[in-house]
Amino acid sequence: MINDQTKINGFILNSVSLVFNIFACLISCIIFLLILYHFYYNHVKREDKISIVLCGHIYLEILIYSLMLSSMNIQSILGHLYNQSFNSSSCTFLRYLAIVLLGMLYLNFLNQAFYRLIRIVYSQNRWFQSLKLYLILPMIEIIMLTCILLCILVPLNGVTYLPNDHFCYPTLTNIPSILSTAFVVYIGPLCCISFIYMHITRFIHHQGNIQTLVIKQRQSRDLLILRRILIIVNLLLHLGIPGMSLIIMFIITGEENPLLARIVLFPVSVSQMGLSVALIFSIPQLKNIVLNLRPPNTVIPVNQTVRGTVHIKTITGTQ
């Protein structure tokens, strides 16, 4: 049993996380609908479509995953206030799905990094710059990721109901299960993303002295975008650091924090909110879509104003 002070701390963590998750849901839902709107009315340039599609995949993942995190926060708050139990097969199924969605979030960022690698470093390869490829790729990835995670989690009983937290979640003290899942969902994709962006940065710096002015300007723009994307990579990195740190501490000391699951989920909620905002300022194509929401300034042509003035003077003179 956990003491009253620990329950209060857990309630505060849940409440703050719920606010962050609701904010992430609202932002990601608005941006995703804007992307659909611009695609439906064909407002997206042909060369920008792949970048916008990749952003749409990411925002859809953030939206669904934040909704799941919000449901976990609500369950925990209700369980804390009314001592309700939410132990059911649907609870376990949804947490398996949440793990798959978290893995897909990292894979979508990996797809985005891969596309930038092809566009900047291997621009002659047109097959990997096909819109159809990036529409089909997430479907293939989610099937493969689901099979891999189920093969890891189900035999090891990775997802269980946590009575103190009142929701289902991977058992963080089940070391074989959690380390295997962390490698597939978090460590592997993040290492690939970091390697790709380091390779792109080295390529741009290496090509800087032997290219024409036009290509230099384009590469300077790409380098600026990469610097902004580093913020996103840092958010992805910090998303898992607290959880991994607590797991390492548990391995060393053998003592489990009663709020372990909620402490692990708190930075995830913060990162979801940060990602939903940071993407807008990091991806120029996405930023242009958001800026188009502003009402255009009405400008009256000078010649039209002059003609109107002359017309008024003519009428006045006639009278």
Image (cartoon, helix red, strand yellow):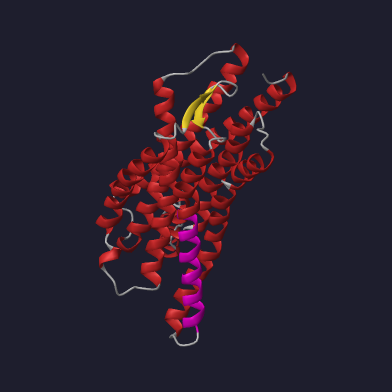
Splitting the image into 4 quarters, where does residue 211 fall? bottom left
Q: Percent x, y for residue 297?
A: 48, 53
Q: Residue at x 40, y 67 (%)?
A: 117
Splitting the image into 4 quarters, where does residue 7 fall? top right
The number of callouts visible is 0
Left or right side of 112 for 239: right
Q: Residue at x 39, y 73 (%)?
A: 121
Q: Nearer the viewer, residue 282 or 302?
A: 282
Q: Residue at x 56, y 45 (%)?
A: 271
Q: Which residues are magenta?
A: 189-208
Left or right side of 1 for 310: left
| Most frequent secondary structure within the magenta stretch | helix
- 76 is within the stretch colored magenta: no
Q: Percent x, y for residue 2?
A: 68, 21
Q: Percent x, y for residue 299?
A: 46, 57
Examine the rendering and report whether any part of residue 294 can be seen.
Answer: no
Q: Nearer the viewer, residue 247 or 270?
A: 247
Q: Nearer the viewer, residue 65 or 157?
A: 157
Picture layout, residue 89 above or below residue 217: above
